[in-house]
Image: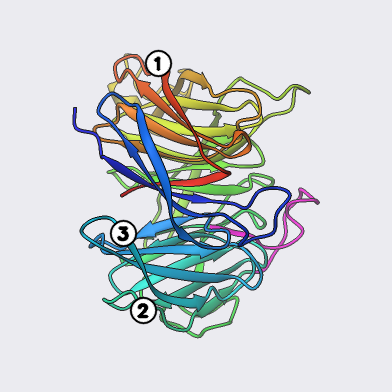
Amino acid sequence: MTIPSALWIGTYPKADAGPGTGEGIWRVAIGPSGKFAGGELVAPVASPSFLALDPSGRTLVTVTESEPGALASFHVSDAGALAPAGTAASGGSGPCHVVATDTAAWVANYGDGVAAVVPLAGDGALGAPRTFPHAGTGPVADRQEGPHAHFVHVWGDRVLVSDLGTDELRTYPLDGSGPSGVPEAPGGQVAAVLPPGTGPRHLVELPDGTILLVGELDCRLHVLVPAGPGRLEHVGSVAITGRTMSDGAAGYPSHLTVAGDLVHVGVRGPDVLSVLRVRDAAATPDGLDDSVPGAVGHLVIENVCDVPLGAGAWPRHHAVLADGDLVVVAAQNTDELVAIRLDRASGKGEITDRLELPVPACVLEA
């Protein structure tokens, strides 16, 4: 099995320190056995909590999750060094997610619920943002008092933006066309409405166009299917894990990935990496019978493993490496990266190594 030799790691500041007092982007090596081989701080940046590479792999873009919100970009050398290339406003407050295309960086600003598109030049320079503020609330008073854009997914020639505060997925043209700064801008529309109190966070798209989305507030995996141009239909959800926090409350899912028929979800609180098997219901012995456990729409979803990461780990983000046999988790609150070897047949996982690293928040293949 071939495993990438290096990872970019985004971090938060220490709890007792302000942004910019030591955190930054790290480069971490990992060997074929799933063992870490050290790491180094390669670019001091304030609160680089989410990272993205452009399609060429030559430009690395990071959010600066502080006030005012900002983006920074770096040129990636053949040797893996980072050279500053540009900075720009993120267009909102508390940017928490970014995705880079050949010509633009789309960013979700959690604090004020603004989606924004920032021009990205071939040399990594960043332009001024075009902003698309969201509006609305949800029933969870302390988390949904207003919009909270949380994640951007490139969706064909459009983007999908999840909003935890309004229980919506909104969609915009990939090039960001349409009036800037208008909540109901032409070209921007609601693609899907989730059940009240879902708190949509991150999502993945399956080869057939089905969307799997984690609800941060209800700890469920939601299934949405295409329902016409720019539209998705919510067809149901399943519990991600039976594990709970010490007080019996459900956990808070963070990131999810897919490799083959396995979906991996980090769940904060219970502090596990949950592994679920997803298959087409038509291929099961009982076909499309809704009585099949885990049947949601045309899928059957089954939790096959919860890998304990350690008390207080708070898995913020993770990356699946190589052919899906290895997952590296950013354990935010225990200041470490955790490597997990997965058995693809059973979905079972075991921890192969841990690396001490201050407040990791994002894992990205280098």
The CA distance from mark 1 to mark 3 is 36 Å
Task: Choose mark 1 or mark 2, whichever is in front.
Answer: 2
Q: Is residue 299 above or below residue 59?
A: above
Whole-percent x, y for residue 44 in the image: 50, 61
Among numbered discs 1 and 3, the one appearing first in the sequence: 3
The residue wearing badge 3 is 81
Mark drawn on residue 125: 2
The answer for how far apart the CA atoms under marks 1 and 2 are is: 43 Å
Q: Quadrant of residue 244?
A: top right
N-terminal-most mark, 2 or 3: 3
Q: Amino acid at mark 3?
A: Ala
What is the magenta range? 135-150
The answer to which of marks 1 and 2 sits earlier in the sequence is 2
Q: Is residue 136 magenta?
A: yes
**Three-letter amino acid code of the residue under disc 2:** Ala
Which of these two is toward me, 163 or 321? 321
Residue 112 among magenta residues: no
Vertical position of residue 248 compared to residue 114: above or below? above
Name the element at disc 3: loop
- For residue 184, which quarter of the picture? bottom right
SS type, badge 1 = loop
Residues at marks 2 and 3 touching, judged by CB atoms closer than 8 Å: no
- The reply to whether residue 230 is visible in this rendering is no
